[in-house]
Amino acid sequence: MMQQENQITGPLIGQFDRLGKRIEVLEETLAQLKTLDRALHEMQFIIFSYVEKIDEGLVLIQDEIVVWANRAACRILGYTLDEVINKSAIGLAHPKYRDQLSARFAMVQAGDTIPGGVLWPFISKSREIKYIRPFSYRVMYMGRPAIMTFYYDVTDEKKAQEELAMKAEMLDKVSDLIYMLDTKGIIKYANKAMCECLGYSQGEIMGRSILDFHTEEHRERVKLRLKLATPTSKGKYKTEYVNKNGTEIPVSASGKVINLGGAEYILGVARVILPHDGPI
């Protein structure tokens, strides 16, 4: 009878021993999974905190419907999160461009590579036009293709560019030679009259030193005047430019320091001296 009990309990002891080892492995695996789960939650929290603090809009779109958006995406257009979730992303765009945007979304969601950075006009909640520069990528969401888009509000930048373009156009209408230099005398802008006077295109002038277009006789004096220019400079001086064909052109010039975008430049104005003008 004792021998039969040993024969029965012997295999059972081995099974219990193997089961105990398996439990130890499972407990170790469970501990690793808990650690991984905690790390994953921490990573998700970090990502969520980041996307909610950035100034750029971030939107997840699927089948033209807004699935998710960060705080900046809503703020840029003046909406709350509840007002944009499950709403048509196309419906937020300017009516004139909705068909184009719909086609663009379809191409991105289908996997086509499309250059980003194109400006799109959207309508804010207050009915203002907001220009955004989006960058969109195809992603997978809930097992289906979707679009992840992040974008910048460039409304102020566009307005500034339009204002500068308008001012440049106005400056091209005047007969005076108008140019802008950095503090080293490098030409950053020259109006149409300046280009025509020197016989160069704007592209040929931009980036070159203003001294390159002066006669050798006047270069040192002009260099000194550039150093002495101040925001209140008002005096005029006589100098000579050299046309592309070698013709020397006497001009009456003046310049003063201006601040543009936080940087200092020298704004210059010159007028060609005609024979009948007499001495300055």
Image (tube, rainbow, N blue to C red):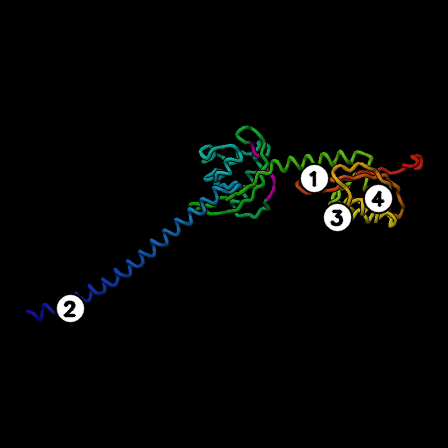
Residue to which mark 2 is pinned: 10
Residue to which mark 1 is pinned: 259
The three-letter code of the residue at mark 4 reads Leu
Residue 122 falls within the magenta-colored stretch: yes
Residue to which mark 4 is pinned: 198
- The residue closer to the viewer here, 145 or 83, is 83
Q: Secondary structure at mark 2?
A: helix
Crowd around label 3: few <14 · some 14–19 · many ≥20 (10 Å): few
Gap in angstroms between the C-alphas marked 4 and 2: 107 Å
Q: Looking at the image, is mark 4 or mark 2 earlier in the sequence?
A: 2
The three-letter code of the residue at mark 1 reads Asn
Gap in angstroms between the C-alphas marked 2 and 3: 96 Å
Gap in angstroms between the C-alphas marked 2 and 1: 94 Å
Task: Between label 4 and label 2, give the one nearer the viewer.
Answer: 4
Is there a contact, CB below 8 Å, between mark 2 and mark 3?
Answer: no
Q: Quarter holding the N terminus?
A: bottom left
Task: Between label 4 and label 1, give the one nearer the viewer.
Answer: 1
Q: Looking at the image, is mark 4 or mark 1 earlier in the sequence?
A: 4
Residue at x 87%, y 44% (from the top left corner): 240
Q: Looking at the image, is mark 2 or mark 3 earlier in the sequence?
A: 2
The three-letter code of the residue at mark 2 reads Gly
- The residue closer to the viewer here, 158 or 114, is 158
The three-letter code of the residue at mark 3 reads Lys
